[in-house]
Amino acid sequence: MTGVTDMTQMAGATGAGGGAVGGDVRGLWGVVRPYAGRLLLAVVAGVAAELCGLGLVAAAAWLIARAAQQPTMAALSLAIVALRGFALGKGVLRYLERLAGHDVALRALAELRGRVFDALAARGPAAVRGRGTGGVRDGEALSGLVSDVEAVQDLLLRCVLPAVTGVVCGAAGVVVCAVAVPSSVVPLVAGLLVAGVALPWAAWTAGARAAARVAAQRRRLAVCALDVLDGAEDLAVFGAAGRFGARAAVAARRLERAERAGSRVAGVVGAAGLAVQGVTAAVVAWQAVRSGADQVQVAVVALTALVAVEAVLPLADAAQRMRDVLASARRVAALLAAPPPPASRAGASVPPGPLSVELLGVTVAFDTPHVTPHERELVDEQSPGLRPGGARDVPASRVGGRAALGGVALDGVDVRVERGRRVAIVGASGAGKSTLLAAVAGAVTPLAGTVQLAGRDLNAYAGDDVRAAVRGLTQDAHVFAGTVRANLLLARPDASQHQLEAAARRARFLEVVRELPDGWDTVVGEGGRGLSGGQRQRLLLARALLADPPVLVLDEPAEALDTVTADAVTRDLLTWPGGGTLLLVTHRLAALGDADEVLVLDRGRVVQRGRHDDLVARPGPYRDLWEAERLSA
Ligand SMILES: Nc1ncnc2c1ncn2[C@@H]1O[C@H](COP(=O)(O)OP(=O)(O)OP(=O)(O)O)[C@@H](O)[C@H]1O
C-alpha cells in the first residue's frame, strides 16, 4: 500500500470527508463524460490484462502439472501456445490500459482545471476562502484547491480502474475454480470477500482517523510556515525568527508522527491482505485435495486463487484513496456549483453620468471569523494568558494582522448622497468605512436594508453594469506585472495619451512616471514590485481616476503619501470639476473643508454628518478626531 503521504496531502486540504458521495462523483462525471469511450477502453484493457495474467498462471500451472505426467508433445502444444498468447497479451493490454487511462485522466484534469479557473475568475477569492470547515488562510486554501483538482486523477487511475479490474478478475477466478474444482469455490469466495470487502472497509475506517490527524497537523504546519515565510523580515528585525522557526519545527515533528501512524495503518492493512491471499490459496488447494481432485486441478485452483485475490487487494488502497478523493470531489463540485456571480444577473442598465447613491437601513454582518482554529491553537500555545479559561476571543490582529473577529460591520445605515456630490467618510479604524464602500459597489450583500443607485435597487441592475458604474480604489487593489501604461489602461483601454497624463497628473503620478527609466513603458513586477509604496498608491489612484465611473469610490487613496501631498491630492479630488459622485474614505481631515459633506462612522453607524466647518464647530467625535490630528501635526 503506497501513498499515505499523498493521500493525506489531499486530506490536508480541508480534512472534511464523507457525505453526499454520489452527488460529488456525479458532479465530476461531467468532466470525464467527453472521454467516456477512452475510459471504457482503459477499463476493458485493464480487465483483459488481468484475465491474461489469470490465464497465464492457470495455463502455466496446468502445463507444469501435466508435463510431470510425461504426455506427448501434441497434448501440451495448445497450452504452450496459450501460455505465449497470455504472456504477450498481458504486456500489450497493460500498456494499452495505462495509455488510455492516463490519457483520460490528464484530459479530464485539464478540463477540470479550466472550469475551476473560470469559476475562480468569476467568483473571486471568496470562492477559495469559503472552502472547507472553519475557514482557512488564502495560501492554504489555494494549495488545498490545487490538491483537490489533482485528485480527479486518483479517482480514475487509483480508484475506478483498480476497482473494476479487481471485481471482474475476482469473478473470473471464481468461474475458473468452479469449472476446475467446484468445491474450491467456497473458500475462494470467502477469501475474496475478506480481501475485497472487509479489508477495504477496515482501511476506510481506520485510515479516516489517521488521515484526520495528519490533515490537522498539516494545516498547523502550513500556518507556521506561512508566518515564517511571509513575516521573515519582521521576525528577523524583532529577533523572533528562532522562536517561530522552533514553532514550525515542532509542527513538522507532530506531522511526521501523525504520518508515521498513518503509515502503520496502511502497513497493517497491506500485510493482512498478503496473509489473506496466502491462506485463501492454501485452503482452496486443501479443499481441492479433499474433494479428490488430481494434481493438475489442485495446481490450477490454488494458483488461480492466488491471482484472483491479488487482483482485489488494491481495493483496500482504492478505498483509502476514495475517501479522500470524495472529500476533494465534494469541495471542487461545490465550487463549480456555487451560485452564479452577480455578473450573470440580468437587469436594467445603469444610467450614464454621476449617480445618486442611497443606503436605506443597510446592515452588513460578517459571520466568518478570519481566525482559523489552528491559528487560535497557536496563539494559545504562545501566549496562554491571552485567553483566560478560553472564554475570551483573541483579536485576529494578534495572529498575523488580519481583520478582527466577525460581527456587525454596518448597523442600519441610512445615507443619501445626491448625484455629483463629493462626500468624505471618516471614522476610527474598524468603524465600517470600507464596508460601506463595498456595500455601495455591490461587493457585499446587506443582511438587511437596500442600496440604491439612481433611485433603483442595486439588484435591479445587471451585475456587470454595477461593477462598471461603481468603482475606484479599494484597499486590496492590485498592480499587475506589466508596463505602467498597461496597468493604467486596464481601467480604460481606449484612453488617449492626453487622458492618461491628465489622470496621472491628478494622482501626482506623472512626476513618478517621468523619473522611471522607461517612462510609461517601464515594466513593474506583480504587486507593484519596483515601485515604492507611495508610487504604487499613486499608480492605483491614477488608474481609478482614469476609469472616471459614474460613482467613484476611493478607499484611503492618499494613505501612503506624505501629509502635504496627501492633503493636496485629497483637495484636488474634492474640487476637481466634472466627474462622478465621489465617496472618499480617509483618515486625514485637513483637506475635508472642500467636501460637500462628511459622514462620521462609529461602530457601523453614522454618528455625525455635515460640512467640515460645522462639524468642527460643535463638540462630537469629528471634533475629537480633528483635534487629535492637529495635536499630532
Ligand atoms: N471580510 C470580512 N470578514 C469578517 N469581518 C470583516 C470583514 N471585513 C470587515 N470586517 C469587519 O467589519 C468591521 C468594519 O471593517 P471595515 O474594514 O469596514 O472598517 P474600516 O472603517 O474601513 O477600518 P479601517 O479604517 O481600519 O480600514 C471590522 O470589525 C472588521 O473586522
Image: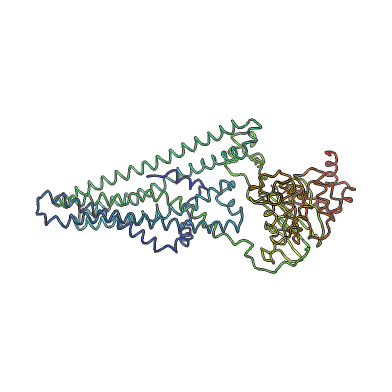
Residue that protrudes farthest toward the front in the picture: 518
Quadrant of res 47: bottom left
Q: Is residue 412 visible?
A: no
Image x and y of residue 195, in percent? 32, 49
**Residue 535 spot, x, y in % from top left:** 73, 46
Q: Residue 356, position in %: x, y?
A: 78, 63
Q: Is residue 71 visible?
A: yes
**For the point 55% across and 50% down, which residue is it?**
132
Q: Residue furthest right?
A: 617
Work out whether residue 295 or residue 589 is closer to the camera in this orientation and state it.
589
Answer left or right for 308 relative to 568: left
Q: Residue at x 44, y 51 (%)?
A: 323
Q: Position of residue 516 (x, y in %)?
A: 71, 46
Q: Nearer the viewer, residue 551 or 599?
A: 551
Residues 358 and 190: in front is: 358
Judge from the rendering whether residue 87 lies leftward or rightward of residue 615; answer left or right: left
